[in-house]
Image: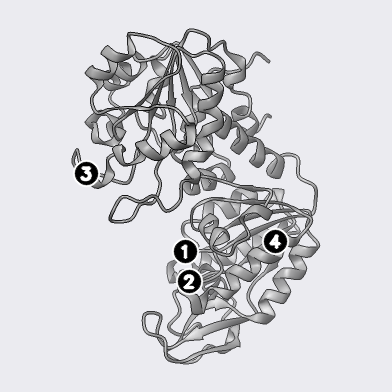
Amino acid sequence: MISNILMMSGVKSLKDVDLAGKRVLIRVDFNVPMDAHYNISDDSRIRAALPTINYCIDHNACSITLISHLGQPKNGYEDRYSLVHIQKRLERLLEKKVEFIDDLDTLKAQNSHCSAERIFLLENIRFFQGEKKNDPAFCKQLADLCDIYVNDAFGTSHRKDASTYGIADFAKIKVAGFLMMREIEAFTKALENPIRPIALVVGGSKISSKITLLTSVMPKIDKLIIGGAMSNTFLKALDHDMKASLVEDDFIEVAKEVLNEAKAHGVKVYLPVDVVITDSIESPVDIKVTPAQDVLEGFHAVDIGPATLKLFSEAIELSNTIIWNGPMGIYEISQFSKGTFKLASFIADSYAYSIVGGGDTADAVEKAGEKEKFSFISTGGGASLELLEGKILPGFEKLDRKES
C-alpha cells in the first residue's frame, strides 16, 4: 500500500501548469519574528517563498496575490501583526513593487485589471473571521481572486484554515509551490528511501507531544536517541529518581511501552547517562554534572552531560540518515545550551543525510551557527512533526494530483 507521504509527493506543482496570463494566488508563510519597532530579525521564511514568487513572475502570470498570516491575533486587526510591516522587506528581496491591500473588495477590484508583474500583498489573513473558521463563503471569496491557487506555506499545512485548506474546494486549479515540494521531497528521502542506518533524535520537554511520532516511525528506524526533558520520563521509567526534574508521571507506562516496542523492532535506544543539573532554572547558582541516576535532591536536569554527548555522537557517526526533532535541554539559557549546540555540530559535521524538523530545533541549529551544514531544515515545526507521524497534511490533501 502506498504511504501517505508518497501520496502527498504526487501532487501537482507550479511546473505542471501554464501560468501565462493567469491570476495566481500564493498562500505563503511570512510569519517572521519582529521586534517592538517592527524590525524583522529573521527573514528566512520570506526568502523561502522567493523561488515560487519569482517563477510566477518569470512565467508571465498576469497578477500575483500573496496571502499570509503573522502571529496569533485574537480578535481582528492588531497593528503589531499587520503585514504592512513586511511590505518593504519583501519589495527589497523581490526588487519589485508590492501593493499592500487591507480588504478583499479592494483587492478584487484591483485584481480584475490584470497586468504583467503586478504583485499584491493582502493584510494578515487571520484578521478575517472566515480564516480560522474555514468558512465556505470566505473560501470562495479567496478562490474568486485567482485562476490558479498555489499553496507554499508548509508551516501551516497542518491547519484546516480557509487559505490553506478550504480554498481548494473552490479554486479551479490548485498546486503546490516549490517550498512545499522541497519539504515533502526531503522527508520522503529520509523516511521512504533512506540510506541506513537511520537515526531519529528526539528531544523537547514532553513525551506526550511525541507519542504518535515514536510509535509510527519505530518500524522505519534503526536508532532512537532521546534527550531533553522528555528523557527524564524514560529515565524514571527505568527507576531513576529524577528529583525536581520535569517528569510526566502519567506517561511512565507509555515510556516503558515505547522501550519495549523499540526492542521488538530491533531499534537501539540511547538515553542520557549523565545530565547537567541546577538548583534553579530561573536563577541558577549551583550547576554541576552528575550521572543520570544520581540527580541531587531539589535539583533539575536541564541538559545532557559530556558522557552522553560522546555516546550520542558515536551513534550519530555510525548513521547515514538522521532526523532531529527537539532540543537536548533548555538551549535558550546559555548555561544549559551546550548539549544542544554541540549535538548540532556533531550532526552537521557527519556525512549523513540530516534533516531538522523545524520549530525549536531549527532555531537551535541557527543559534549554534550550523544551519548551512545540514542537508535540510524544515520551515514547519508542527507540520513536520505530523509528517513524521505519518499523517496526510491538510495543505496537500486537496491539491490537484499528477496522473499516475
> What is the secondary structure assignment of the residue under circle 4?
helix
SS at badge 1: loop
Q: Residue at x 46, y 10 (%)?
A: 22
Q: Mark 3 points at which residue?
A: 79
**Vertical placement of 71 versus 182: above or below?**
below
Residue 326 visible in the picture: no
Type of the residue with mark 3: Asp
Q: Give the number of the mark in front: 2 or 1.
A: 2
- Amino acid type of the residue tagged 1 in the rendering: Lys
Q: Earlier in the sequence, mark 2 or mark 3?
A: 3
Residue on which disc 4 sits: 347
Q: Which of 210 and 132 is in front in this view?
A: 132
Please name which of the two marks, 1 or 3, marks the residue nearer to the observer. 3
Q: Which sits earlier in the primary sequence, circle 2 or circle 1? A: 1
Judge by depth and name the residue closer to the eye, 98 or 281: 98
Q: Distance between the residues labelled 1 and 3?
A: 34 Å
Q: Quadrant of the N terminus?
A: top right
Residue closest to the eye, 162 or 27: 27
17 left or right of 170 in image = right
- The numbered mark at residue 330 is 2
At horizontal 23% and vertical 25% (from top left) the residue drawn is: 103
What's the amino acid at mark 2? Ile
**Disc 2 from disc 1: Cα separation:** 13 Å
Query: Mark on residue 206?
Result: 1
Identify the element where label 3 is drawn.
helix
Q: Who comes first in sequence, dot 1 or dot 3?
A: 3
What's the CA distance linking mark 4 and mark 2? 19 Å
Residue 303 tag number: none
Q: Distance between the residues labelled 3 and 4?
A: 40 Å
Are circles 3 and 4 on residues that touch, CB within 8 Å? no
